[in-house]
Image (cartoon, grey):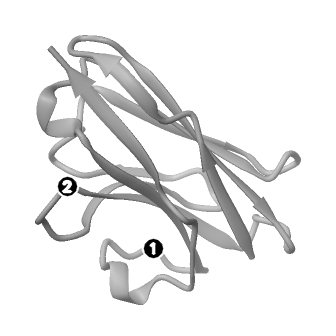
């Protein structure tokens, strides 16, 4: 599975951002799609995931202000984050894991290259 992220960039604090993860190579249905992020000097942190059955799970840092959804026909997953704050600034990655979800980066099967998201005041 080849994953490509898009939609990152610069956003003002309080604004919203839609991050896209597009897959190619295999159909997405059997994969759980995850989003992680990594701030400078920090560890890779779980953000959100969506299973093939459309179950959603969010990390504490974005819970209540994020929505993740997927379109298997288009092989794409979208993560929307609202009310963005400076601490959302990070490199964002999407990752795919077959069948079962996991918040652990080391258990993911495939990764995108990542994209920068910067929140300014």
Q: Residue at x 41, y 88 (%)?
A: 107
The location of residue 100, given as percent across then percent down, is 51, 79
Q: Position of residue 84 (x, y in %)?
A: 24, 23
Residue 18 lies left or right of residue 61; in this view the side is: right
Task: Give me the residue at 79% from left, 51% from top.
Answer: 72
**53 and 107: which one is in front?**
107
Q: Residue at x 56, y 33 (%)?
A: 7
Number of labels in the image equals 2
Q: Is residue 64 left or right of residue 42?
A: right
Which quadrant holds the C terminus?
Answer: top left
Residue that mark 2 sits on: 39
User: Residue 88: in sight, yes or no?
Assistant: yes
Q: Is residue 98 above or below residue 121?
A: below
Q: Is residue 103 above or below residue 81?
A: below
| Relative side of 29 to 8, left or right | right
**Nearer the camera: disc 2 or disc 1:** 2
How far from the left and from the top, in percent, is residue 17? Answer: 44, 24
Q: Is residue 81 visible?
A: no
Q: Position of residue 40 (x, y in %)?
A: 17, 58
**In this figure, which residue is indicated by the disc labeled 1?**
101
Callout 2 touching callout 1 (CB < 8 Å): no
Neighbour tally class for label 1: few under 14, some 14-19, many 20 plus, Cα within 10 Å: many
Residue 71 image label: none
CA distance separating discs 2 and 1 = 23 Å
Disc 2, SS = loop
**86 to 72, vertically: above or below:** above
- At label 2, counting other C-alpha atoms closer than 10 Å, the crowd grade (few under 14, some 14-19, many 20 or more) is some
N-terminal label among 2 and 1: 2
């Amino acid at each position: 599975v080849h994953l490509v992220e898009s939609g990152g960039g610069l956003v003002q604090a309080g604004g919203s951002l839609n991050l896209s993860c597009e897959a190619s190579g295999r159909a997405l249905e059997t994969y759980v799609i995850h989003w992680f992020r990594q701030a400078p000097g920090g560890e890779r942190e779980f953000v959100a995931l969506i299973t093939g059955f459309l179950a959603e799970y969010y990390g504490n840092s974005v819970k209540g202000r994020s929505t993740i959804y997927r379109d298997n026909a288009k092989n794409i997953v979208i993560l929307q984050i609202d009310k963005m704050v400076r601490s959302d600034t990070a490199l964002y990655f999407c990752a795919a894991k077959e069948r079962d979800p996991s918040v652990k980066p080391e258990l993911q099967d495939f990764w995108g290259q990542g994209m920068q998201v910067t929140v300014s005041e």
